[in-house]
Amino acid sequence: MTTTLAPPDTGLYTPQQVARIFQVDTKTLANWRYLGRGPEYVKDGGIVRYPREALQAYLAQRTVHTNA
């Protein structure tokens, strides 16, 4: 029996993963970073990662509540 180990959940997402979640192109995320928009991110040596909490906060800030 072969067991496949899943990578540990670090709570950090790649730009490709975030692009799929937000249904935008990775170039859009890069442009948002350049303009100082979009979710907060971590950058280390040119590697960009988005913390789960930053994505949740970004979405919460943009949630529209209606008076329905």
Image: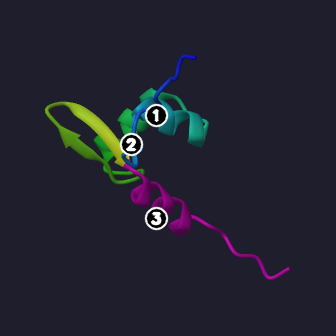
User: Is residue 10 shown above or below 53?
Assistant: above
| Secondary structure category for the residue under label 2 | helix
Q: Is label 3 or label 1 in front?
A: 3
Q: Which residue carries the number 1 mark?
A: 28
Label 1 packing within 10 angstroms: few (<14), some (14-19), many (20+): few
The part of the chain drawn in magenta is 51-68
When the figure is inspected, residue 11 is found, relative to residue 4, above or below; the finding is: below
SS at mark 3? helix
Cα gap from disc 2 to disc 3, whole angstroms: 16 Å
Left or right of 25 on screen, residue 11: left
Q: Kindly identify the amino acid type of the residue bearing the numbered disc 2.
A: Trp
Mark 3, residue position: 57
Q: Are marks 2 and 1 in contact (CB under 8 Å)?
A: yes
Q: Quadrant of the C terminus?
A: bottom right
Residue 45 image point, x, y percent: 13, 32
Q: Is residue 67 magenta?
A: yes
- Find residue 55 and report its horizontal and vertical position in percent: 46, 55
Measuring 54% from the left and 17% from the top, which residue is drawn there? 2
